[in-house]
Image (spheres, rainbow, N blue to C red):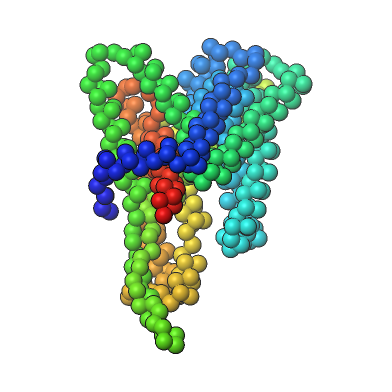
Amino acid sequence: MKLRAVNPEVSLNRFLKLFKIADLRNKILFILAVFVIFRLFAAIPIPGIDTSRLKEFFENNQLFSLINIFTGGGLDSLSIMMLGVGPYITGSIVMQLLTYIFPQLEQMYKYEGEAGRQRFNQYSRLLTVPMAILQGYGFLILLTRQNVIDSLTSFEWFAAISVVTAGTLFLMWLGELISEKNLGNGISLLIFAGILSGTLTSIRQSIFTYDPSQLTTYIGFVVIAIVVVAGVVYITEAQRNIPINYARRVRGSKVMGGVSSYLPMRVNSAGVMPIIFALSILLFPGMVANFFSTSNVEIISRIANFFNDFLQNQIVYGLLYFVLVVLFTYFYTAVTFDPKSISENVQKQGGYIPGIRPGPPTAQFLTHLLNRVTLVGAMFLGIIAILPQIVRGFTGITTFTVGGTSILIVVSVALEFMKAVDAQLSMYEY
């Protein structure tokens, strides 16, 4: 893949145009205002929390510490936004999996156009409510059993779960408002804001705990971060171009077709969704194990503690995380890129891949090529996911917990936002 040289002067002029065009300026200011509202609500805690025990709990639980990043710090402070957009993401995962079980859902999602996708997304929104209730109840039960929060009365349980569920729905609504501005996906931008907030906090902690004797380590950490960002940008933008030729057709006095084009196949067509899916799956057994770890039944308590220790093992956790990311990369790519449908569309338009017969042979060729290209993207995502553990093992820096996963999401969302803004600018210019 060739990278285009960027003219700084042109980039600066296009950046200044963002604030000269009133409509575009108002959209960006609106998104920033939503970010401020999100951060304000994320700072409102649920009363009755022992902050010292809560801090100790997150320091000893790497999975919840990582998930806390995606809620913008709302989880470790038990704010009313403590669940973030996690229940909505879980609901989306469930709906995606159900497309393989119920053909009607697959028909709706893939073949009914924009109206079908809107109905599909509406079902995901409705599923968010029970998911938020279950996740909120499970996490509060977990903290109660860990003596982080005091025992709650029935009314307090109802109030707490209602508040955190309402917080998730409010956050989902804010994401929909952002999406309506056509400057990127609202949910992704909210996750971006949460990660950025957690990153700034981690940087501040690293500065306050700075040790001059580890200057070389910190420099190496910064160099690794720069290399990772460059690699993420390169892989995110990389694609395999498949040549498509269109047969020449004569209709009356007009000659149509006879041109060449290409079908882009992205190396990482799944984006950041496999990592988010993997985190959601890893969260469930950890919560269940912690929930039953203090059970009065001895055999259940032993099994739960065994699984809890098993998941806390750095090597086991890293391997599970890596495998799940690779599997979900193939799964999500299969959902979004259908070789059979694409080959049929190309054939209907009179196109063909040079050296490949139209129809089923084209679909087989695309499937074979997709598996090979996706392997590169899947391995890249898997390595990025476990990169923080590798870096912490070599550098020993524990205060800066934001790693490859966060960098991947931040860079991917930023690139998507920049492309959306560039498209809006081009529209206004023409």
Q: Position of residue 326 (x, y in %)?
A: 43, 47
| Position in image of residue 154 (x %, y %) | 77, 21
Q: Is residue 424 above or below residue 37?
A: below
Task: Tell me which residue sits at (58%, 63%) in the image.
Answer: 111
Residue 393 location in percent, x, y?
32, 27
From the viewer's side, name the closer residue of 309 and 349: 349
Q: Residue at x 74, y 25 (%)?
A: 158
Q: Quadrant of residue 284?
A: top right
Task: Give above or below for 36 relative to 351.
Answer: above
- Name the residue furthest left: 216
| The furthest residue to the right | 155
Q: Is residue 217 above or below residue 344?
A: above
Name the side, left or right, on which 173 lies relative to 202: right
Residue 298 at least partly seen: no
What is the count of numbered marks?
0
- Decide if residue 162 is on the left or right side of residue 231: right
Asked whether the viewer can see residue 181, the reply is yes
Q: Residue at x 73, y 23 (%)?
A: 159
Query: Seen from this angle, which residue lies furthest bottom?
Result: 252
Front residue of 177/263: it is: 177
Q: Position of residue 363 (x, y in %)?
A: 44, 69
**Looking at the image, which residue is at 35% across and 78% down?**
258
Which of 348/205 is in front?
348
Instruction: Name the image quarter holding the C terminus.
Output: bottom left
Q: Nearer the viewer, residue 250 or 379?
A: 250
